[in-house]
Image: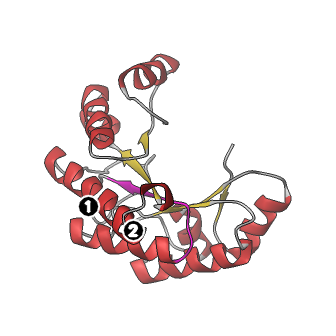
Amino acid sequence: QMPCCFDALSAKLVAAAGFPVTFVSGFSAAAAKGLPDTGLLSYAEMEGVMRRVSTALDQQIPVIGDGDTGYGNAVNAKRTVKGYAAAGLAGIMIEDQVAPKRCGHTKGKEVVDRATAIARIQAAVDASREAAGGREDDSILIVARTDARGTHGLDEALERAVRFREAGADICFVEAPQSVEEMRAICEAVEGPK
């Protein structure tokens, strides 16, 4: 289990409760500022949240941060990954929605085309390795998320997750499966951690 946090205090509460990892939720970080999760927080604002959480935890438990869409194109995604790595995070989630993005469980979300999504994840993986000086085992983990289940169906979501893994993503996340059977299909189709 990986409870979400949104600031340094909530992160400390997760660690004090004995959980082994936490996730800085973009939804929660936006809500804590009275904003909806529609891409209104900038990269700099989110990087600041990540840095404060990481500093407060002082490596007590690993932190994975919500990197949204990488805040732009593949070049922006590389900057975001390097910034989150420098902030001390163990992992970052990058998704395939268009910008401005929406919370994964809301209507009206859209995803970029498959080639753009794969390029975004490849850029994130490259940035992860670059930030670690080429040492793969010291790099920030890339959690590659697809929201294509809700827009294009399960088959497209599975294809994207498989391609993200081929691009080097450490963990794949298919957003919002609609049944236990779909969860099983994801586990069977996509190698590695999910």
| Residue 87 versus residue 152 in the image, above or below | below
| Residue 192 versus residue 68 in the image, above or below | above
In 3D space, how far apart are the residues under numbered discs 1 and 2 (Cα atoms)?
9 Å
**Residue 90 among magenta residues:** yes
Whole-percent x, y for residue 92 in the image? 47, 60
Whole-percent x, y for residue 70 in the image? 34, 66
Mark 1 sits on what residue? Answer: 123
Instruction: Please name the residue shown 62% across and 73% down the image.
Output: 32
Tell me the amino acid under the disc marked 2. Answer: Val
In the image, 29: left or right of 167? right
Q: Nearer the viewer, residue 93 or 97?
A: 93
Instruction: Please name the residue shown 63% across and 68% down the image.
Output: 6
Q: Which residues are magenta?
A: 87-95
- As helix, strand or loop, the secondary structure at mark 2 comes to helix
Mark 2 sits on what residue? Answer: 81
- As helix, strand or loop, the secondary structure at mark 1 comes to helix
